Amino acid sequence: MTTTVSAAGLSLRYGSTRALDAVSLRLSEGVTGLLGPNGAGKTTLLKVLATAQPADSGTFTVLDHDPSTTGGRQEVRRVLGYLPQTPGFHPDFTAFEFVDYVAILKELTDREGRHREVRRVLAEVDLSDVRGKRIKKLSGGMRQRVALAAALVGDPGFLVLDEPTVGLDPEQRMRFRELIARAGEGRTVLLSTHQTEDVAMLCNQVVVMAGGIVRFEGTPAELTARAAGRVWSSAERDPGAMAGWRTGLGVFRNVGDPPAGAELVEPTLEDGYLITLDGMVAEVTA
Amino acid sequence: MTWHVAEDDVRAYARGELAPPVLWSADTHIAKCADCRALLASVTDPVALDAGWERLDAELDAPKRGLVESLLVRIGVADHTARLLAATPVLRRSWLGAVVALLVMTVFVTNSLKHAESPSLFLGLAPLLPLAGVALSYGPKFDPTYEMTVVSPLHGFRLLMIRTVAVLVAGLGLNGLATLAMPDYGLRALAWLLPALALTTTGLALTPRLGPVLAPSLVGGGWVAFLLVAHNLHGGTLAPFTPAGQGVAAVVVALTGGLLYLVRDRFDTRSAHPWGAA
């Protein structure tokens, strides 16, 4: 697969906090999930790749554009769609007005063409019917779709989505996943999330971060395979397990190094994620 | 139907070239006559027809402009620039209303102190309003869409300047109106103008280093402190409002304007400062 976005040695500190530590990765077309616990550096990495924040060191390119110069940064921004973690809105704007505003920021100045593009992206996120409604009157899920529509303006080749499914109810989350899957056709999408279900359902690639470091880069199947032979069930929580929890069936699911004779079970992506983070969560939250 | 629109006229109608009053007759007739409508459809270029429908659709979809936006478009500001300005927080009625109320009170108090040599209270306050207006029009604390704005290809400095000019026009305009309400002081009542520009450009030039909150706060605080010191040292007309003070303000405008131009690229990314410089 052709690499569309690549980063090498990205580092960034906030005072004494190491937010990114020599992060290198390569993205290609399709949806790549960025998994990690709170404080892992996911949002910082997205901000750097979206050119919202400069890194202290390291380089990256987006669709062959190098953002290290003012002109290059401009070019990156022309091919970028960005949905921040908490997208802000002008609450008195309607959905149409807001997306129209973002379209102007994306240099679509011709009124007719711009309005055509606004209608297209609002239709793409199934919001045509409420385009005239004020944003403050829309539900949380609809607002999130308005923000996605704004990110899709101009048909960007690189879409950066920072935890877009947080705070949505299960139905809205499913709907949003469909939209992301659609958006991932023919473009590179980097989706930050702490929900392994998002990755399992949407992504062809996954990156796991913790403590500002990339801990894993590969396919979801490869991440799942990391837990092969390291997940077992038991009637009681196994004290030797790295993590264990009671499932809906009443038995405990344990992840870690199984004792002899343990009843091994099929691993999931979540198990692979936990194995990858083994010892890292404490490090991150310390 | 006893008559039909001539074919040449139907063709001209389709091209949008039929002039009144024949146009009015054709409009009325075509609406009622199926034969003429059929003829119109046959002579109309389908691509142009689709484009026409699309234009109509776009027109129906186009958002209604608010007061500020309509006003801007009416005075010749481009449609897209007017929309950018409509999203400027301090161009909302609530902010402008608060500024007007403050100015009215200040002018009232100043006019009550007829014995004063110069309207010092007004002259001291008026430069702070544009400074505050510009500070509140941009940055992560005040622009809810700041994060989307900063990664847009529209250069951050250009957006800042568009908003600054609009806020300055509004702010200086209101100050100017307030000045007219103090005719007894003559041109002395205009001595706020250069300090207002000096404070605004200084605040903006310091923003990349100090952030969009600290920079204007320090500049505003420094201005007030300077006025208090000047007042204690010398009664009557305060130093910034004397001819020499006005000259100094003009020099500050030129210097900080130049500095602002030099640091323009710093408005293009969010700084790593924890308070998030513009």
Image: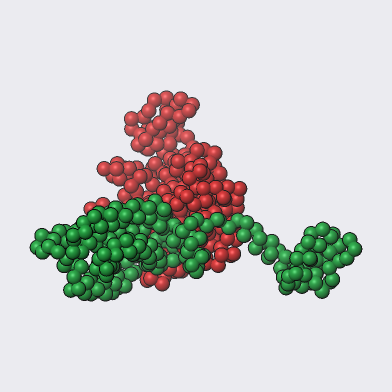
Chain colours: A red, B green
Is B17 on the left or on the right of B92, as rendered? right
Q: Residue at x 51, y 43 (%)?
A: A137
Q: Residue at x 73, y 70 (%)?
A: B20
Residue B72: image location, x then y, percent: 47, 64
* Quarter the C terminus of chain B occupies: bottom left
Position above or below: A242 against A33:
above
* Quarter the N terminus of chain B occupies: bottom right
Q: Which residue is nearer to you in this view: B255 or A238?
A: B255
Q: Residue at x 84, y 59 (%)?
A: B34
Q: Quadrant of residue A46?
A: bottom left
Q: Quadrant of residue A61?
A: bottom left
User: Can the viewer see residue A276 in this picture?
Assistant: yes
Numbered circles on residues, count: 0
Q: Residue at x 55, y 55 (%)?
A: B64
Q: Which residue is nearer to you in this view: B271 or B17?
A: B17
Q: Which residue is nearer to you in this view: B276 or A281?
A: B276
Outermost residue, left side: B233
User: Can the viewer see residue A207 in this picture?
Assistant: no
Is A272 on the left or on the right of B126, as rendered? right
Residue A89: image location, x then y, percent: 45, 51
Q: Quadrant of residue A73?
A: bottom left
Residue A223: image location, x then y, percent: 45, 47
Position above or below: B42 against A231:
below
Is A117 on the left or on the right of A276, as rendered? right
Residue A96: image location, x then y, percent: 54, 54
Position above or below: A275 against B247:
above
